[in-house]
Amino acid sequence: MKRLFFVTTNLAVSFIVLVGVKSVVAEEFHVSPVGTLAGDGSREHPWDLTSALAHPTAVTPGDTIWLHGGKYKGSFQSKLKGREDARIVVRQIPHERAVIELVAHPQLGTTFLCYGAWTRFQDFEVTCTNPQRRTKIAGSWPSDLQRGSIQCRGSHLQFVNLLVHDLGSGFGCWSEAEGGEIYGCMIYNNGWGGPDRGHGHGIYAQNKESIKIIKDNMIFQQFGFGVHVYGSGNAFLKGFQISGNAVFHNGCLQKPGGQTTGILVGGGAPLEDVFVEDNMVYNGGLQIGSSSTAKNKDVTVRNNYVTGLRLFYQDRLVFEENTVIGGWPVLTVYQNEGDSLENHKINRNVYYNTQPKHYLFSLLLGKERNALFLKEWQKRGFDANAQVHDGHPRGVNVFIRPNLYEPGRANVVVFNWDRKPEVSVNLKDVLKKGQKFRIVSARNFHGPAVVSGLFNGEEVLLPMRHVAPAQPVGMPEYELPEMEPNFGGYVVLAE
């Protein structure tokens, strides 16, 4: 009897262990443009996208939902809910092209609306093919134009390596969407033109809890701003990591030669716990704070490479190791009259004064305007170890950002001040020797490769010739700015 009891107990334990193992095995499900609600999510009987995003009972934390190639037309709402230790992943099948084409819906409007939590959306494309890009109605909500956007209202959602283009705005990530991440995305040609201004930003974000990450994206050619972390005095602008983004030529769709701020972080509400680091901004500049006198605290701006920079109303600021290129003034700092500057740590920055006979710094203290050369700036306690150069930079600056979610992929950004016909790019930290690769222009991701081949371990010569960009939807003849050979944004892709 004792022996029988011992065996039975072990069988029970074995059964419990097996059940536990089964519960943590991730499942894979399939979605197709020809899938149906009656499907079971198998490859042979896939779901339609609406059904898959509604969180079918078969989907559990840790599972992957694969999107097969083709067009998914409509407006969609995700309610998928994973766990912190087991995200649900919605991902494009490798080597296929899944495109979500937003079309107006009577209840949802025109949007890809993301609720739920702990879900990653990866690799696919979101766009709108409505050719209307202009309206005679001023303001942010014209009744005659709906282009849609990705609206993030769930917690800890990730958007990774997406192509997001030709929408009304790229991403809207709001305060109720706690934390979350926008990573490695190509965000371009979004927005519309109104009689008042260009509308629609690449990323419009607010945050209240946790840290919201905006990292390693290419953000360019919107009607509005590139990154717009902004809101009224009632909004929350707390907890941001904005790093490694390449931001260029935003505002150019409103009018040829137009330009808006590349990255704006600040609004009516004070900033708090904000890190802006390692970004590259070409034609547009960086602005921290806004014309509102909200006091921003615990803001770190470090190691950015930007053309133009303004700092508004900081209480506690770290501003170090940045490279700022511009004419009078190279750097503008706004403070309220009587504000203490003792909490600011401003040092080891590099400034290129493209108008050498003019002052470098503009320091505004209320109504008092101070135009300062370097020595006067240093007497204020700033930049004891600064470097100042007259004119534009010389040489070539190459920035390589390996992708954290896809081995063999990286963003490459080139400031080619010497206008060389080709530049050397070191991809040893991206590719393996003998690996097949191609490099494409960010402005024409699906276009022909700029260079391709087998990686031999040596530096790759990247031609800095003009690449025809993908034209904005509805604007086939619009004159987009030329970049090469002065500047280029590229993506390395392993094959």
Image (cartoon, rainbow, N blue to C red):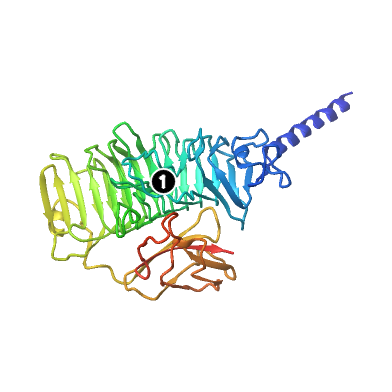
Towards the viewer: 373 or 495: 495
In which image quadrant can residue 468 be found? Answer: bottom left
Please tell me in which quadrant of the rendered image residue 321 appears. bottom left
| SS class, disc 1 | loop
Front residue of 136/43: it is: 136
Q: Furthest-bottom residue in view?
A: 421
Residue 35 vertical placement versus 488 (above, below):
above
Q: Position of residue 96 (x, y in %)?
A: 61, 56
| Residue 216 horizontal/vertical position (percent) | 44, 54
> Residue 56 occupies which quadrant of the picture?
top right
Task: Look at 59% across and 45% down and name the residue there.
Answer: 90
The residue type indicated by label 1 comes to Ser
Question: Is residue 267 found left or right of 74 in the rendered image?
Answer: left
Residue pictured at 45% horizontal, 54% vertical? 473
Position of residue 63 in the picture relative to residue 486 (left or right): right
Task: Give the quadrant of the C terminus.
Answer: bottom right
Q: How many marks?
A: 1
List the residue tagged with mark 1: 169
Front residue of 473 and 442: 473
- In the image, what residue occupies the spot 37% across and 46% down? 200
* Percent coordinates x, y for residue 145 in the rendering: 41, 43
Residue 110, placed above or below residue 281: above
Residue projecting furthest to the right: 1
